[in-house]
Amino acid sequence: MARNSPSSIITYIQCPRLYYHQYIEKRSFYPNLDLIKGEIVHGVLHDFFSSNPPIIETNFKAWAQTNLMNSFMKRWDSKKSIFFILHLNEAELHEHYKDCLEMLEFWLSKFIEKIKGTELNFIEAFRTLKPMTEQQCYIQDLDIKGYIDIVEKENGEIRIIDYKTSSKFEITKEHKIQLAIYAYLYKQAYGITPHKVGIYFLREDLHLMAVDENMIQFAKEECKKISEKTKSKNVEDYPQNKGYLCKKLGANCPCHRYEEQEE
């Protein structure tokens, strides 16, 4: 198992102490509803592109809707034990269920529009637009592994895309760092610099940024720096950053909960 990933690097940037608890001590992750919903939606989209429409199908829109819905219900049901731990009542569960489904339906409507825009039949268009999903990239000397949500090759461009279920349609500092690391990982793995990286906000749309050598170099230096900083197993080398996460999550910040367990 790789020591670091784009996600663990972002965790370190947000709070080294939280990184220590989760990746050095390997404590159990506290269930987080937003992360669980994100995992479900990511999984459904991966399932969707892992399947192919049957050749004999005539109503391809119905096939796409049914395929998406079946995967969603299966993945939602697989998280019922976690929902129970979070003490969500039926009304709350229904709202979150509806929220995930609306995101997926919105994404599918955009994808269907894209299919129609090719002027190809559905099967040909699906095969043409079908991206590579969950692309694994590994840098051995830094022991960093990442899984890229989507790699698209469109109009001669290679585009790396990360899905986000956030309600805020803003590319944050952390997003930019994560995207830069994905671009760096991809270049190291395949010897090609992607043309663009971006975030597909599943409640809104796709936002892209051009990749240049400065971005790749920044990501390389960031990965090296954090690789060095995370070699220690001493808790004192991982100070608590009472910043963004603490302010956003308050008493629900997982770092606070880990510290409470030790008292």
Image: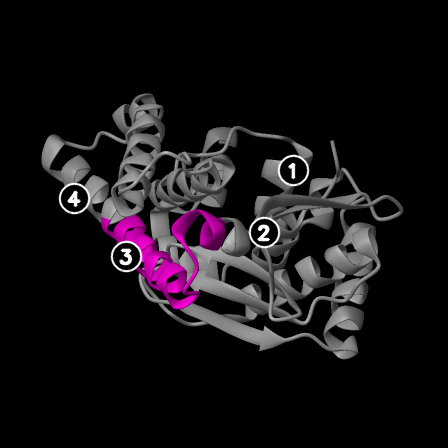
Mark 1 lies on a secondary structure that is helix
Against 250, residue 48 (above or below) is: above
Residue beneath the point at 25% across and 42% down = 62
Q: Which mark is residue 11?
A: 2
Residue beneath the point at 66% across and 70% down = 156
Pointers 4 and 1 in contact (C-beta within 8 Å): no
Callout 2, which amino acid?
Answer: Thr
> Could you say where residue 139 lies in the image, as x and y percent from the top left?
82, 48
> Could you say where residue 169 lies in the image, as x and y percent from the top left?
37, 69
| Sequence-first disc among 1 and 3 | 1
Crowding at mark 4 (Cα within 10 Å: few <14, some 14-19, many 20+): few
Q: Image quadrant for the N terminus?
A: top right
Callout 3, which amino acid?
Answer: Phe
Callout 4, which amino acid?
Answer: Glu
Residue beneath the point at 81% across and 43% down = 143
Q: Main secondary structure of the magenta part?
A: helix
Give the quarter of the image for residue 24. top right
Against 240, residue 200 (above or below) is: below
Q: Which mark is residue 106?
A: 3
Instruction: Please identify the residue farthest to the left as the structure is shown.
Output: 91
> Could you say where residue 199 lies in the image, as x and y percent from the top left?
49, 64
| Sequence-first disc among 3 and 2 | 2
Instruction: Please identify the residue farthest to the top as the structure is shown.
Output: 81
* Residue holding disc 4: 95
Instruction: Tell whether 199 sits left or right of 79.
Output: right
* Residue holding disc 1: 23
| Sequence-first disc among 4 and 1 | 1
| Sequence-first disc among 4 and 3 | 4
Pointers 1 and 3 in contact (C-beta within 8 Å): no
Residues rendered magenta in the picture: 102-126
Along the line of sight, which residue is nearer the eye, 158 or 7? Answer: 158
